[in-house]
Amino acid sequence: MTSPLNFTPITATINHLLAQEPWAQRILAAHAGKIACIDGGALVLKWQVSSDGLLQVPPPDAPTSVTIRVNPADLPLIVQNRERAFSYVKIEGDADFANAISQVSQSLRWDAEQDLSKLVGDIAAVRIVAGARSAVAGVQSVHRKVTENLAEYFLEEQPLLVRPQAVSDFTNDVTKLRDDLERLAKRINKLN
């Protein structure tokens, strides 16, 4: 097993998110002192839950309460659907602690407006976040339209792709033609 690394920026980021969500801190605080290991093969992260529900680096030889093994190939699926993230991992150890981690990881969200308001003020933060959301929605819309247009082009105008129904119809026609040919061959053999 790869030795765990001390990722202070990751720990600080997660603790920042936890600090914005008291409910998440309460859930984790119930497991104070327990150690979670997230094993991604080449990357291993270990954290101990403190009494206030935040994360800290555990002592080097402390036993792990739960190990969550993540296949790096599944990371895109996990990021795409956080609600199903734990269905892509293998869990060993304390099931209650793993369930608490799952619950927190599914619902923990970054409140960008709150962080930005400390830098630029409340009104500017709301407008910046709204502008960013609008930009993301615009990019997603353009991506969807380009994808649809490319699919239409390759299906209709420059047929490099074939619709599944067309393949099914072609297969049925070939089967019918084969059966007709076999019947015709039998009739010709009877006539001879």
Image (spheres, helix red, strand yellow):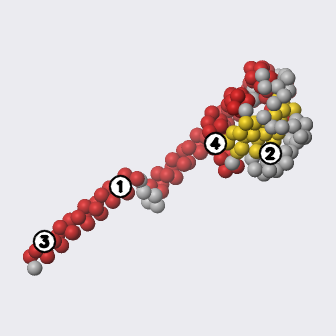
Q: Quadrant for residue 175, please give it.
A: bottom left
Q: Position of residue 43 (x, y in %)?
A: 79, 48
Residue, disc 4: 88
Measure the alpha-carbon separation of dots 1 and 3. 29 Å
Q: Amino acid at mark 2?
A: Val
Q: Which residue is mark 3?
A: 187
Q: Are marks 1 and 3 in contact (CB under 8 Å)?
A: no
- Relative placement, left or right, of 114 versus 6 is left
First along the sequence among labels 4 and 2: 2
Q: Nearer the viewer, mark 4 or mark 1?
A: 4
Query: Which comes sooner in the sequence, label 1 or label 3?
Result: 1
Point out which mark residue 168 bears: 1
Decide which of 50, 172 is in the foreground and name it: 50
Q: Quadrant of residue 145?
A: top right
Look at mark 2 in the image and give the residue it sits on: 44
Q: Is residue 1 above or below residue 91?
A: below
Tell which of 58 and 174 is nearer to you.
58
Disc 1 vs disc 3: which is toward the camera? 3
Picture residue at 64% right of the left edge, 42% below the top: 88
Cα separation, mark 1 vs mark 2, equals 48 Å
| Residue 51 appears left or right of 143 | right
Q: CA separation, marks 4 and 1? A: 34 Å
Q: Residue furthest left?
A: 191
